[in-house]
Amino acid sequence: MNSTCTYLVFCISLVFLLAMRCEAIDTTIGFVSQPLNQSNFDIQKPYDVPLEQRYNFSDGVHKLWVLKTDKPHSRNSKTSPRSEIRIRGYDYSSGVWQFEAYGYVPCGTTGVSVMQVFGSNPPYATTTMLIVKDTSLYYYTRTVILSNLYNKWFRLNVIHDVDQKNVKVYIDGVLRYDRAGRLGKSHYFKCGVYSQKEGSFYMESRWRDIRIFKRHD
Ligand SMILES: *[C@@H]1O[C@H](CO)[C@@H](O)[C@H](O)[C@H]1NC(C)=O
Ligand SMILES: *[C@@H]1O[C@H](CO)[C@@H](O)[C@H](O)[C@H]1NC(C)=O
């Protein structure tokens, strides 16, 4: 590359970086942070293994992992294996709610849901699922919301407007998804690992600074 070309590439990169920075917004303005402590984190894990074999909370980081061959979270369930934090105390059926957390997915984990807005009208069970497939994070399985996902922390904000039936997903403050959600009478947030199609043998995600917000009326 000659120097003019190098200079041009540099300028374009700079403009692009600045544009990206400008897009990042504080998604929590107008929202009220809800009190949370460990009692709000209900851990679901394979029913036949002790908690510490699928969950660790240390230095503020919730680490959850599961094996493809694990049992469901309850003896009578026919669902796929999961190790998930189910947020307790903030089930909702109206209003605008927001989940915020920093997430981390280690390389090798694939075919797994790492975050959910639970609850929907049948035939669906969820309004939102964020699914890791290969090296990207998807809204369900079609829309990429974060590529080159592995081995780095990202900030996730999911805003669910029940009355407007809308879901917005922000990664590091940048809007990556904004579309109609699904109906449903009762919702709550989850994060962790919930095995999906073509799941890797070992699946893991980490979460820190989990916060729940409700929009001011
Ligand atoms: C955690 O929060 C719950 C519900 O808000 C409350 O009843 C409980 O006392 C809190 N526990 C601690 C250890 O702060
Ligand atoms: C959780 O992980 C930390 C850091 O790796 C470790 O020191 C601690 O023993 C683990 N706790 C449990 C209950 O396994």
Image: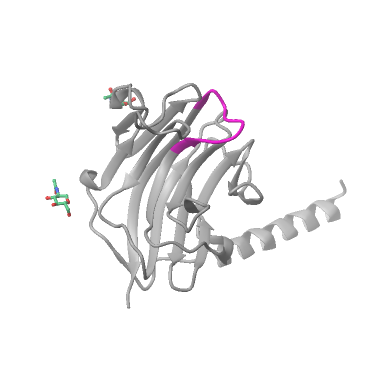
Query: Which is nearer the eye, 81 or 41?
Result: 81
Camera sees residue 153: no
Query: Which is nearer the eye, 94 or 77?
Result: 77
**Residue 194 falls inside the magenta stretch:** yes
Image-based side of 14 in relation to 49, left or right: right
Image-based side of 80 in relation to 144, left or right: left
Residue 7 at what x, y percent from top left?
78, 55
| Residues shaded magenta | 193-202
Q: Is residue 193 above or below residue 128?
A: above
Residue 211 at what x, y percent from top left?
33, 54
Q: Residue furthest right?
A: 2
**Residue 69 falls inside the magenta stretch:** no
Residue 77 in which image quadrant: top left
**What secondary structure predominates along the stretch shown in magenta?**
loop
Residue 66 in which image quadrant: top left
Q: Is residue 100 above or below residue 29?
A: above
Q: Which residue appears at 80% of the width and 51% of the height?
A: 6
Q: Which residue appears at 56% of the width and 43% of the height?
A: 131
Image-based side of 11 in relation to 201, left or right: right
Residue 129 at what x, y percent from top left?
51, 49
Query: Which is nearer the eye, 24 or 8?
Result: 24
